[in-house]
Amino acid sequence: MASQPRSVLRTGVAAACVLAAGAFALTSLQAQRAGQDEPPGAQPAAAATSYHPVATERPFQEVYEEMSARKQEVMERARALLEARYDLSDRPVEGVTMSRGKPVQGGVRVRLPEGVSSWEELAAMSRSEIRERNLFPEGFKPLPHPFQEEGGMVFPQHHIDEILAQEQRNLSRFDVDFDLPEHFLPEFPPPIYLTTRPELGDVSQGQLVTTQNFFELFNGILNPKQLEGLRLLVSPFPQQQFNMTDDRRSERPHLGVTCFDCHANGHTNASTHLVGDIRPQEVRRRIDTPTLRGVAQERLFGSQRALRTVEDFTEFEQRAAYFDGDIVVAQKKGVNFLERGSEVHAMAEFQEILNFPPAPKLDPFGRLDPELATEQELRGEALFFGKARCAECHPTPIFSDNFMHDLQAERFYNEDEIVNGRKMSDGGPTKVFPLRGIKDSPPYLHDGRLLTLDDAVEYFNLILGLQLTQPEKQDIIRYLYTL
């Protein structure tokens, strides 16, 4: 399928500046806020800085009205980008569902570039030809935050609705909404499986776990320390966009967000954010919230930070990542200093008993049981451990090597292009996430740019030069569904 005109995908300097001037100026750097009519001999504007302004210079109501009025424009731009990059139709795979029954979306959704008739034709080209002819698919490039210039946590509407119903806590923002269609997201609410009580199956009983029901659901299943850890994981604490100061993006003063507002039920609802450890704003990576299932077997945390323990991850999130990595403004907004020896450890102890969903076709070594698997699934497994080279980064039993790898995608396209406020730079190592239970965790890659597993197979086939045939791709996808 031919892509839409490339002009839809790019924002020129003027267009980017229009949005940036309106939105980012509200919280921008001092150099960007400097006046243009300074008298002769005035001191030059301050140099650019990573810090947010501590003292707000505009009344909240003025900011609220201006950004609310611009919200439709922001979302129209985000939706136009998605529609230009992807086929967003609802086309589930027959007979394939997530753990609680939500249909899994299938088919390659990234649009082919103009002038290319098939993925096989594109994969047969050299890297230099793809780069010179500007044929790298737009959907394979980094996916911007729906409001890259502002960033911050954005939640799917179904999660917002459920939290509002249970806790009367409104996670809506007045400047931006979540952008990806619901049928490409994980099922909601997701099930919870525990390594300590596998015989119980889904211990969430189909409910989103919050402050209102965690004790009722888990008393007697968890020990007191684990129960305290879960309480903290569902307790709201101040965050950059959701807090009680006038520098917020909620209409009313806000208690904050919880760990499980993104990692719903210890899994994920695909909430998005920007990483706190990269500057400037145009190169900050969008985050597709990863699942917490199986973290006891992981040794690196965060897409790029390479935090060494789940305790480090838990503490870093609330002390810094919640506040875009700005520890100065965190103090103003009410940073939650967790106590390492009790609170952090209790939160980690609960996270470390979150299990992957059942995979009945896998044997104790993480390989397919020949008596249970189909011929196509077995062919896919052989490709996974052979020609496709998947297992080199995704070995059993959790299908991750717990290392960082650099795919060097910049070999295929111009990284300096700006799309919706995001520079298309994609270099550097990224954590290898586990593939166990992968069909429950769409969309894919660290920023959610790949909507289906079909997209993921095409992406790696091109990036790694695997030269897989169409039947081989389908065999691998069928195998991934068994994990």
Image: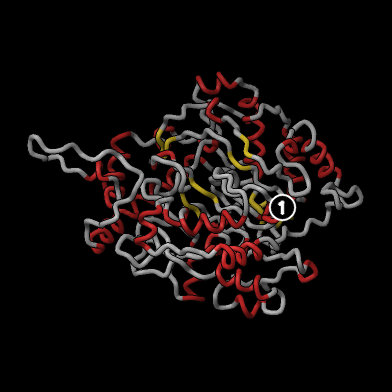
The residue at 32%/65% (across/down) is 245
> Is 396 on the left or on the right of 261, as rendered?
right
**Residue 413 place in picture, x, y as percent:** 50, 27
Q: Residue 125 occupies which quadrant of the picture?
A: top right
Q: Is mark 1 on a helix, strand or loop?
A: helix
Q: Mark yes or no: residue 480 visible.
A: yes
Q: Mark yes or no: residue 178 visible.
A: no
Q: Nearer the viewer, residue 333 or 21?
A: 333
Q: Nearer the viewer, residue 440 or 36?
A: 36
Question: What is the quadrant of the N terminus in the image?
Answer: top right
The residue at 76%/35% (across/down) is 472
> Is 321 on the left or on the right of 75, as rendered?
right
Q: Which of 6 and 170 is in front in this view?
A: 170
Q: Which residue lies furthest to the right in this view?
A: 371
Pointer 1 residue: 297
Q: Residue 5 occupies which quadrant of the picture?
A: top left
Q: Residue 238 occupies which quadrant of the picture?
A: bottom left
**Residue 3 place in picture, x, y as percent:** 50, 35
Q: How many dots with numbers?
A: 1
Label 1 crowd (10 A; few <14 / some 14-19 / many >=20): some
- In the image, residue 247 sits, relative to residue 133, either above or below, namely below
The residue at 54%/50% (across/down) is 288
**Residue 213 place in picture, x, y as percent:** 59, 77
> Is 416 on the left or on the right of 119, as rendered?
left
The residue at 43%/32% (across/down) is 6
**Residue 209 place in picture, x, y as percent:** 59, 71
Q: Residue furthest front?
A: 341
> Is 82 on the left or on the right of 358, as rendered?
left
Amino acid on which the number 1 mark rests in the picture: Gln
